[in-house]
Amino acid sequence: MRPILPIAASLALLLAACGSQPPASEQTPAGVEDRSPKAVVAEPASVPVPPPAPVAVDPYDPANLKDPKSILSKRSVFFDYDQYVIRDEFKPLVESHAQFLIRNPKMKMLIQGNADERGSREYNLALGQKRAEAVKKALALLGASEGQMESVSLGEEKPRCTEQAEACWAQNRRGDMLYTGEY
């Protein structure tokens, strides 16, 4: 009977040591993450917003005469030296102004023919008139009314550039298209 008593005492001590004790006051319990499924709230379906409908823009609206993005804001047709033939690069410009005059029959245009300083005064006046008439005839052939247009020659009197160089003279060989209120 003797060996059983120490074993029972040891078991009692072991069980007493394993017993649960309340946590010390300085110990805080670890947080518990809640992983339970939550109700899913459906977000309102986003409705795609259609792009705004394109607004019909009248390319021949008088407001385009001052819009730098419009071809109508360009008003000069340049000529080669001693020539009064409209170069191909300026034909779209003349066509646009002809269409503008057709769609705006109350608008009037003054075409000023200019020449560079080379040549006599009389010669430059005659060349400027031929340049103004060339622009006027092209506009008329494209349908603009003759009554809407007037042509004059300024000769060499209204230079855009005053240097003695070909690039400068090229700026002075031109026909300028001015509308009512601009001359």
Image (spheres, rainbow, N blue to C red):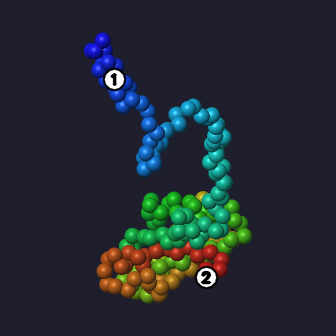
Q: Which residue is mark 1?
A: 9
Q: Which residue is mark 2?
A: 183
Q: Nearest the camera: 167 or 27?
A: 27
* Percent coordinates x, y for residue 125 in the rendering: 48, 83
Res. 18 in view: no
Measure the alpha-carbon separation of dots 2 and 1: 125 Å
Which residue reaches farthest front? 1
The residue mark sitting in front, 2 or 1, is 1
Which residue reaches farthest left? 3
Asked if residue 54 is positioned above or below residue 77 in the image, the reply reads above
* Percent coordinates x, y for residue 3 in the rendering: 27, 15
* Element under disc 2: loop
Q: Residues within 10 Å of mark 1 (few under 14, many from 20)?
A: few
- Under mark 2, the amino acid is Tyr
Image point 68% across, 71% down: which residue?
107
- Under mark 1, the amino acid is Ala
Image quadrant where residue 117 sits? bottom left
* Percent coordinates x, y for residue 116 in the rendering: 40, 81
Left or right: where 153 falls relative to 145: left
Image quadrant where residue 61 sits? bottom right
